Amino acid sequence: MITVAGIKSCDTCRKALSWLEEQGIAHEFHDLRADGLDAKRLAAWIDELGWETLLNRRSTTWRQLPEADKVGLNDKKAAKLIAANPTLIKRPVFETSQATHVGFTDHVKKALKK
């Protein structure tokens, strides 16, 4: 079973969920905005992927942050910032038994079909 973490209003998340349905791949959706993001899950993602991969610096949320929040980022500061603003996460995040993937690219699609 694949867990897809994202936001319902995100076009890319909707496309990914539709694609999973078309492929017949079992999955469940975790809405980061409605269901929240626990610290343990976020820490696991950062450990596996790195905060640089997880943080969406092109998001509206990122652009609206005060400049002081954006400078001097490290694992701890990024985790705190993402926990307070889950929309900073690149979406969707796919959790499988083998790995965690971010985004909806051809590479991710290929990994999810395995």
Image: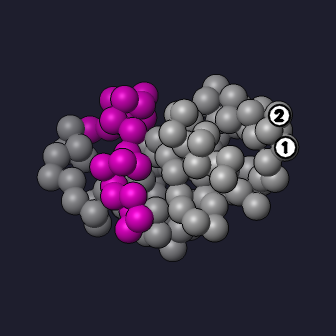
Q: Quadrant of residue 21?
A: top right
Q: Residue at x 79, y 48 (%)?
A: 25
Q: CA distance from mark 2 to mark 1?
A: 5 Å
Where is residue 86? Give x, y as percent.
50, 49
Q: Which mark is residue 24?
A: 1
In the displayed structure image, the side of residue 53 where residue 90 appears, left or right? right
User: Can residue 110 be seen at all in this image of the molecule?
Assistant: yes
Q: Are circles 2 and 1 on residues that touch, CB within 8 Å?
A: yes
Q: Quadrant of residue 23?
A: top right
Q: Residue at x 52, y 51 (%)?
A: 101
Return the residue nearer the eye: 81 or 95: 95
Amino acid type indicated by mark 2: Glu
Disc 1 secondary structure class: loop
In the displayed structure image, the side of residue 65 where residue 25 appears, left or right? right
Where is residue 68? Give x, y as percent.
19, 44
Return the residue nearer the eye: 23 or 85: 23
Question: Start and end of the magenta stretch?
Answer: 46-66
Classed neighbour count for the residue bearing mark 1: other residues with Cα under 10 Å, few (<14), some (14–19), many (≥20): few
Image height check: is 48 above or below 15? below
Q: Residue at x 55, y 43 (%)?
A: 108
Q: Residue at x 42, y 28 (%)?
A: 60
Disc 2 secondary structure class: helix
Where is residue 99? Give x, y as percent.
54, 62
Q: Quadrant of residue 81?
A: bottom left
Magenta region includes residue 58: yes
Amino acid type indicated by mark 1: Gly
Outermost bottom residue: 40
Q: Which residue is mark 2?
A: 22
Return the residue nearer the eye: 79 or 44: 44
* Quadrant of the rendering where the N terminus is positioned: bottom right
